[in-house]
Image (spheres, grey):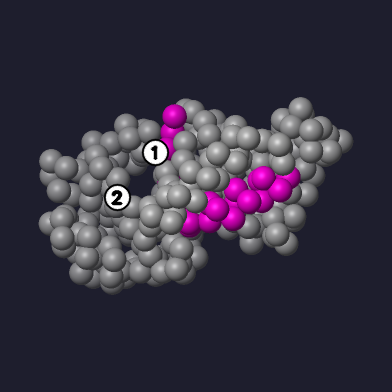
């Protein structure tokens, strides 16, 4: 399978997963239809499925137009069935869904929204995290609690270290600036910032990152790293209070 990154709107990403042999494809979180349609037409692909991580408009905006044009089926979490227009297939937590012979694990990861899920394509070692985990950041909390978000991030963090992270937005530069503000002496963060800055200037996406890099460098995954918390002066906080502190700081960054 090939994974194609489709820029949408101002800073969204949709993703097309293509079976190179059959030319069948699915798309994850199409915020708008036109760039997806253009890619499918140019590459002569058949869009069989539309996968949504959550119900926000900038992740489902292209659903109905794509469904009508390609006779595709729309998938989403069963608890979002009244919030994702045109949904055909209701997914459950920890379900294995199969696309073109590739097993896809669905996990419920509330926090950003109450019914957010991720899609982990096992053979491709790739996870589509929507707005739960970003490259060196995480999503804002609109409907879930801090505890729920910590537990959701733990689910993503438990995937294999070489897992590729495909997130919903191009927020990486700002996220790295925030990480460097708190973790001032981390030379690897500075190297990553310089590398990704060059990519962005050359109009290249910052995604995917790898889970290994995220665990090493993403401050939002360090809620249970006592040495790190001590190093930045927050060693007295428990997991949830630490996460709340840095999430609130990021909201005002």
Q: Which quarter shows the C terminus?
A: bottom right
* Residue under label 2: 4
Query: What span is in magenta?
Result: 162-182
Dot 2 or dot 1: first in sequence order is 2
* Residue under label 1: 126
Q: Secondary structure at mark 2?
A: strand
Q: Position of residue 98 (x, y in %)?
A: 29, 40
Between residue 154 and residue 89, name the one nearer to us. 154
Q: Residues within 10 Å of mark 1 (few under 14, many from 20)?
A: many
Q: CA distance from mark 2 to mark 1?
A: 12 Å
Q: Residue at x 20, y 59 (%)?
A: 40
Q: Position of residue 225 (x, y in %)?
A: 72, 30
Residue 115 visible in image: no
Location of residue 189 (image quadrant):
top right
Q: Is residue 99 magenta?
A: no
Q: Which quarter shows the N terminus?
A: top left
Q: Decide: is 95 above or below 158.
A: below
Q: Secondary structure at mark 1?
A: strand
């Amino acid at each position: 399978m090939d994974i194609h990154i489709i820029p949408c709107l101002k800073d969204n990403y949709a993703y097309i997963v293509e079976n190179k042999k059959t030319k069948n494809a699915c798309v994850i979180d199409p915020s708008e239809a036109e760039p997806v349609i253009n890619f499918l037409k140019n590459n002569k692909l058949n869009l069989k499925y539309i996968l949504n991580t959550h119900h926000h408009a900038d992740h489902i905006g292209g659903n109905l137009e794509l469904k009508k044009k390609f006779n595709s089926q729309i998938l989403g979490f069963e608890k979002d069935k009244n919030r994702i227009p045109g949904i055909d297939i209701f997914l459950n937590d920890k379900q294995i869904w199969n696309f073109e012979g590739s097993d896809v694990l669905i996990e419920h990861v509330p926090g950003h929204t109450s019914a957010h899920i991720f899609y982990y394509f096992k053979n491709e070692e790739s996870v589509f995290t929507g707005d739960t985990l970003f490259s060196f950041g995480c999503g804002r909390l609109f409907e879930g609690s801090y505890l729920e978000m910590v537990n959701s991030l733990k689910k993503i963090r438990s995937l294999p270290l070489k897992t590729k992270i495909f997130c919903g937005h191009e927020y990486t530069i700002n996220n790295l600036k925030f990480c460097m503000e708190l973790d001032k002496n981390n030379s690897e963060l500075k190297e990553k910032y310089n590398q990704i800055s060059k990519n962005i200037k050359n109009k290249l996406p910052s995604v995917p990152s790898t889970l290994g890099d995220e665990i090493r460098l993403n401050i939002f995954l360090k809620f249970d790293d006592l040495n790190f918390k001590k190093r930045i002066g927050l060693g007295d906080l428990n997991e949830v209070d630490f996460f709340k502190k840095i999430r609130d700081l990021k909201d005002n960054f």
